[in-house]
Amino acid sequence: MKSRFVVSPQWLNARLGMVDVAIVDASWYLPVHNRDAKAEYAQGHIPGAVFFDVDAIADPGSQLPHMLASPEDFGRIAGAMGISETDTIVVYDGLGLFSAGRAWWNFRVMGVEKVFVLDGGLPAWQAAGFPVTASTSSPRPKPFVPRFDPGAVRGKHDVLAILEDGSAQLVDSRPAERFSGAAPEPRPGLRSGHMPGAKSIPFSEFSENGKLKELKDLRALFEKANLDVDAPIVASCGSGVSAALVTLALASIDAPAYALYDGSWAEWGLPGDTPVATGDAS
């Protein structure tokens, strides 16, 4: 059985042009991908899609990458993109399933109920023979009234408290080599390793051929990592992008309590007094 938060290319194609359906290209790439999301959007995107700039729709006052924007800023930007919080929003990316999870999480944190991920992303859309266009649309602005959920976000001091009191489980979605400390971090100046007690589920494990795995397979990933999905879980990654896939998976299997550490390793790994462990998860 598939997640209720994903929709197929066929489903979306049948709804192209509907005034209450917003399509969002949330492509964002790591340096290793050597791809330009904005340029690719300009070359071809799903008709009617607007571009969600993960780096720009963020807190301008933070030195950390693409930290969550304030509810006021997010509502203003989303409204200018022609998106209302009552719309049906479909997000996708150019890899199949990667940064679309971050946009999905952004909208969810801001109170949107009908936000979905296009299963397989742009590659699946094109493989199905559906059109792309280089024409950019000028959407009519809409009011977007955010209903911010503070419980969905955690900061560094929250995670430090968790390490003290054990009130939540920590899961890290970076590649296993970065989690263990065997591979250096791609951002200069960061220490290698993971938060003590954290469990590792690399983000690539949540998808297959660019599509979110079946519910039973998602649940099995958490069980294999010795995580209790019925107890609180806080997800982290390199900078808060792939950790959103953890929250997508947890929401899909109806986990009752989960949140995302927005600063993730971009903050935790900075030189300082945050504890760092190396090696595989115990």
Image (cartoon, rainbow, N blue to C red):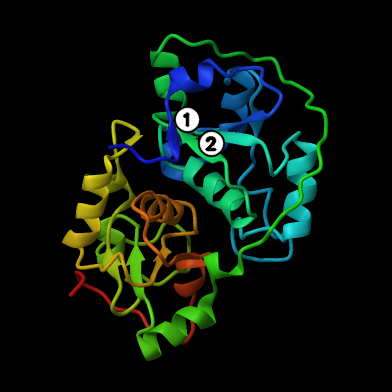
Residue 191 visible here: yes
Q: Is residue 180 left or right of residue 243?
A: left
Question: Of all residues shown, which one is farthest toward the bottom?
Answer: 164
> Dividing the picture into quarters, in which one does residue 121 lie?
top left
Q: Is residue 135 left or right of residue 3?
A: right
| Residue that badge 1 annotates | 94
Q: In which quarter of the image is the C terminus?
A: bottom left
Find residue 27 and name its label. Answer: 2
Question: Please, what is the three-letter code of the amino acid marked with disc 1?
Answer: Gly
Q: Tell me which residue sits at (21%, 71%) in the image.
A: 281
Q: In this view, does 114 lie to the left or right of 56?
A: left
Q: Nearer the viewer, residue 259 or 50?
A: 259
Pointers 1 and 2 in contact (CB under 8 A)? yes
Q: Nearer the viewer, residue 68 or 228?
A: 228
Residue 209 versus residue 245 in the image, above or below:
above
Q: What element carries label 1?
A: loop
Q: Is mark 2 on a helix, strand or loop?
A: loop
Residue 274 versus residue 190 in the image, above or below:
below
Q: Tell me which residue sits at (33%, 72%) in the image.
A: 231
Residue 274 visible here: no
Residue 158: give x, y in percent of width and height.
50, 80
Q: Quadrant of the N terminus?
A: top left
Find residue 13 and name its label. Answer: none
Residue 103 versus residue 40 in the image, above or below:
below
Residue 279: give x, y in percent of width and height.
21, 72
Residue 168: give x, y in percent of width and height.
37, 77
Residue 270: give x, y in percent of width and height.
49, 74
